[in-house]
Image: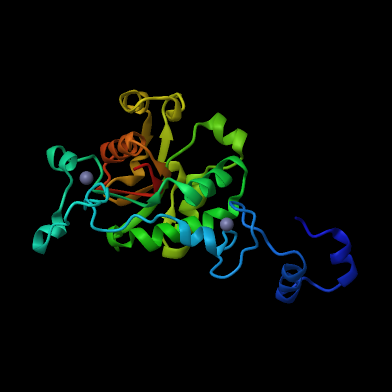
Amino acid sequence: VHPPRLVTAAIGGTAPGAWLTAALDLVFPARCPVCSQPLGDGRRDPLCGGCWNAIERIAAPWCTTCGLPFGTLEPPAGPEALVARCGPCARQAPPFAWARAAGRYAGPLRDAIHALKFHGRRALARPLADLVLDQAGDAWSAGVAALVPVPLQAARERERGFNQANLIAERIGAATGVRVRGGWLSRTRATRPQADLTASERAVNVRRAFAASPAVNGLDVVVVDDVLTTGATVRDCARALAAAGARQVGVLAVARVI
Ligand SMILES: [Zn+2]
Ligand SMILES: [Zn+2]
């Protein structure tokens, strides 16, 4: 529901201030883009308190490399817990030093990401970035020099008008003081939409699909994406950044398919 123009006109003439926002909120309560309810207690604008709290967060114990939660397995204890790796990471180290996703790609988190990407609800980048910082702070190091969003294909970005990974990176950057370097990764060729492909097809589809700027040479950088499915895209991004001389590559994502 949008406040009709006549309300603004009736108050008329005065510069809109916080009191006006509060007054409009009483008459026309802001509604959550996921569940359409008024935002209510615990709101994380524009997400309502109910949806925010219902997000299934991913928490330790997890693989300290890829960030997959160990789930119901008994967590490793003692000093081992600090270097605990899942089976696949122990067998073959991935091209990134660490990866973390804030929540499971399900329920209100999945709906919020859809609303951001496909319905242009850009303001959702703010609570989603907050979620990333809340859940993934353990992997963050003081030496991170830049956040590098996964680039969209040019045609896709033109059609959508924005890159959701870039919006999320901008919010994380604003909260942490780390610069966002959108131009440090680029796509070298067109790829098919990953959503249509199986896991092995996804890996082939994005292989060497990215190139990194030599500006990353010697730096710690963090790749930012909205959703990790198989992780093929961020692995290829990490390979490209490492090939261009990045000292260490981390990965932050809002959600992950588990
Ligand atoms: Zn909601
Ligand atoms: Zn792992």
> For this view, does 64 lie left or right of residue 55?
left
> For this view, does 107 lie left or right of residue 1?
left
Q: Nearer the viewer, residue 236 or 257?
A: 257
Q: Quadrant of the N terminus?
A: bottom right
Give the image location of residue 49, x and y in percent. Answer: 54, 64
Give the image location of residue 101, x and y in percent. Answer: 36, 50
Quadrant field for ligand 1: bottom right
Residue 173 seen in the figure? no
> For this view, does 234 lie left or right of residue 92?
right
Give the image location of residue 237, x and y in percent. Answer: 34, 37
Q: Residue at x 34, y 54 (%)?
A: 58
Q: Residue at x 76, y 68 (%)?
A: 24
Q: Nearer the viewer, residue 217 or 257?
A: 257
**Residue 203, relative to residue 118: is it above or below?**
above
Q: Nearer the viewer, residue 93 or 211?
A: 93
Q: Residue at x 15, y 53 (%)?
A: 84
Q: Quadrant of the C terminus?
A: top left
The residue most toward the bottom is 19
Q: Residue at x 58, y 62 (%)?
A: 45
